[in-house]
Image: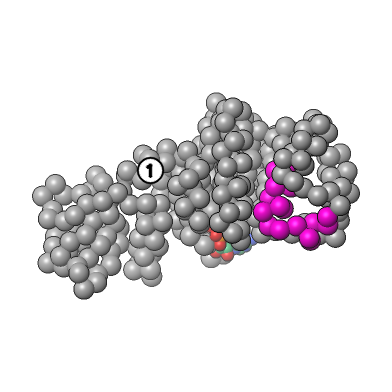
Amino acid sequence: MIMLDVKNVSKKFEHFQLDNVSFQVPQGYIMGFIGINGAGKTTTIKSILNLITVDSGEIQIMGKNVAIHEAELKQSIGYAFGNVDFYTRSRIRTLTKVVKTFYDNWDDEAYRRYVRKFKLIEDKRIAELSTGMKVKYSLAIALSHGAKLLILDEPTSGLDPAARDDLLDIFRELVQDGEISILFSTHITSDLEKCADYITYIHEGRIVGSAEKDEFIDTYRLVNGKVEELEGIKERLISHRVNSFGFTGLIRADELPPSAAVNVAIPNLEEIMVYYSKKEAAHV
Ligand SMILES: Nc1ncnc2c1ncn2[C@@H]1O[C@H](COP(=O)(O)OP(=O)(O)OP(=O)(O)O)[C@@H](O)[C@H]1O
């Protein structure tokens, strides 16, 4: 089943627009949503949560339009924002008492289980929680009301490597039984190398690619060669850099000329993102 279906969504701001954004998150998988700062990740997520009204296009969760069925669908969605503070003076215990009243399917037993699993101390005020703990608290809330789609906006930013690794393990565990799906936005691509099944890449408000992770990476090649070879291939490169050893560039695999005298390697997600952002700089 398709859990989240973003279809041809456009939204225009004064200096930025989401331009015909489309991608799908299948049930039971983790979709990594990547792009550099300002690419449009948060705007897309706000559209999915119906926090902003899109100009055109449609977003469906479990086959239902979010703009029409917002209240019903929010029962099935959990969200966590890594860097946002909410009700910072409340204690966990107090906040949960309020939050649980929003949900029809609240499961106290599940909540108790997640409080223990995530080692949440209920007497602590939100302001006293570390970033990782805040994300875990959001997850505990989401999982206790039976959320089937978790929308995590930069959940790992600001975390140390050990805390990040801990959360990534939790995300993997959550999708294991095929019920829960996760949309995970980040610019820390190494997190996604570890935990995402699919990748959607947004650049300047447009989707550059959305596919299973290895297939997405396999669309690109990193090439390097002597500067003399650059002219013959330059036009096909997404961008390139030159140093004293020669040049390195990113190219779509289907654009690679068979006869080019260059070394070819598979890039990682970070290299794909870095070379795409250089492309933008070259065109400004
Ligand atoms: N309400 C708004 N009015 C005008 N412009 C906006 C509004 N919200 C976002 N933008 C602009 O849209 C662009 C995309 O922002 P967005 O937050 O979606 O990017 P992002 O990919 O999430 O970036 P980051 O990784 O830095 O969080 C930015 O240039 C931002 O200034």
Relative placement, left or right, of 253 versus 16 is: left
Answer above or below: position of 129 versus 64: below
Region in magenta: 124-142
Q: Quadrant of the N terminus?
A: top right
Q: Which residue is mark 1?
A: 216
- Which picture quadrant has residue 105? top right
Q: In the orientation shown, which residue stands out farthest toward the bottom?
A: 244
Relative placement, left or right, of 129 versus 101 is: left
Asked whether residue 21 is in view, the answer is: no
The residue sitting at 12% across, 67% down in the picture is 228
Q: How is the image coloured?
A: one colour
Asked whether residue 101 is in view, the answer is: yes
Q: Residues within 10 Å of mark 1 (few under 14, many from 20)?
A: some
The residue sitting at 51% across, 56% down in the picture is 187
- Is ligand 1 less than 8 Å from the beta carbon at label 1? no
Relative placement, left or right, of 236 versus 65 is: left
Q: Quadrant of the C terminus?
A: bottom left
User: Does the stretch in magenta take in 212?
Assistant: no
Q: Secondary structure at mark 1?
A: helix
Q: Identify the main secondary structure in magenta.
A: helix
The residue sitting at 72% across, 32% down in the picture is 146
* Residue 178 image offset from top left, x and y in percent: 57, 28
Kind of residue sitting beneath label 1: Phe
In this view of the protein, which residue sits in the foreground, 149 or 10? 149
Relative placement, left or right, of 232 versus 206 is: left
The residue sitting at 74% across, 46% down in the picture is 119
* Residue 55 image offset from top left, x and y in percent: 59, 49
* Residue 18 image offset from top left, x and y in percent: 52, 53
